[in-house]
Image (cartoon, helix red, strand yellow):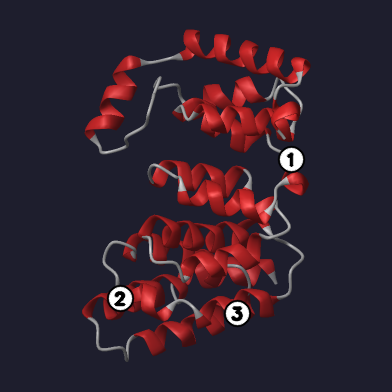
Amino acid sequence: MEYLLDNPKIENTYQEIIRKLRPIQNGAVAEMMTKRGLEYKVNLGASVVSLRQLASGYDRNHLLALKLWNKQWRETMILATLLDEPKQVTEEQLDYWVKSFPNIEMAEQASMNLFVYTPFAFQKAKEWCLEKKNLVKMTGLLMMGRLAMTDKTTADEEFESFFEVLPPLSKDPELSSIFIRSFTHLGRKNKNLNKLAVMFARTLQTIDSPVSQMVAEEIIDELESEYVQEMLNDKG
C-alpha cells in the first residue's frame, strides 16, 4: 500500500489539487466555522460548491482519495469523499474514517458523497447506530436518511430493519434533531414505509423518556401531515 500511495502519477495529481485549494480559501468562513465549534487540523474555509467544482475536473481514484484523506485538512477530506471509488472502499476504511471524523460536517459530507454508494452502506449504517460514540451514531442516522432518499432498488424490509436499533437513540437529546430529520426521510419514501414509520413512532411515545416522546410527536406530525400524504399519493 505504501508503494501504491507513492505512485508518481497520483502524487502529481494530488500536489496539483493542493495547489488549487489556495485560490479558493476563505479565512472569514474558516473563522466563523471555528466559532461554531467545527474544528479541523487545517481549515481553508473553501465552500462546498467550490470543492465540488474542483472535484469535477478529476476522475475518481481510490488511491488519490486515500492520499487526500490522510492530509487531514477539511478541504482534502471533503475532496476525498467526492473522488473515492465506492466499489473500492473497504469495510475497514469506512470504520477508520467514521471514527476519525472531527465533527458533524464531515459526517454529513462523507455520508452523502460516498458512504451511501458503497456495498456496505446498510450494514454499516445499522452497526454505527449501535456504537458508543455519538458522532458515529449520528453518521448511522445520517446514512439511514440518505439511503431512504437515494436508494431506489432496495426492498422495504431492509429499511424496516433500522427500527430494531433506533429506540435507544431516540432518548438522546444530542441526537434528536438528526434522528427526526433522518427518520422522516425514511417515512416519506413510500406509503408502506410511511405507515410503518408512524406505527414505530407511536411505540416511541410509550418509552419513559421525554426526549423519545418529543421525537415521536414531531415525527408523527410530519409524516401524517397533508403535505407528506399528498406527496406519497403523487408517488403512487
- The kind of residue on which mark 1 rests is Glu
Q: Using residue 172 as the reference point, say whether residue 183 is left or right of it.
A: right
Q: Is residue 48 above or below residue 194?
A: above
| Most foreground residue, 5 or 199 | 5
Q: Using residue 194 as the reference point, say whether residue 156 is left or right of it.
A: right
**Label 1 SS:** loop
Q: Residue 232: in sight, yes or no?
A: yes
**Residue 60, quarter of picture:** top right
Residue 219 in percent (x, y) is at 40, 73
* C-alpha distance separating marks 2 and 3: 20 Å
Residue under circle 1?
A: 85
- The kind of residue on which mark 2 rests is Lys
- The kind of residue on which mark 3 rests is Glu
**Residue 43, quarter of picture:** top left
Q: Earlier in the sequence, mark 2 or mark 1?
A: 1
Residue under circle 2?
A: 171
Q: Residues within 10 Å of mark 3 (few under 14, many from 20)?
A: some
Rendered residue at 33%/65% (across/down): 176
Contact? badges 3 and 1 (CB < 8 Å) = no
* C-alpha distance separating marks 2 and 1: 36 Å
| Most foreground residue, 223 or 40 | 40
Rendered residue at 70%/27% (across/down): 5
Q: Residues within 10 Å of mark 2 (few under 14, many from 20)?
A: many
Numbered label attached to residue 163: none
Residue under circle 3?
A: 160
Contact? badges 2 and 1 (CB < 8 Å) = no
Residue 1 in percent (x, y) is at 72, 35
Name the front one of labels 2 and 1.
Answer: 1
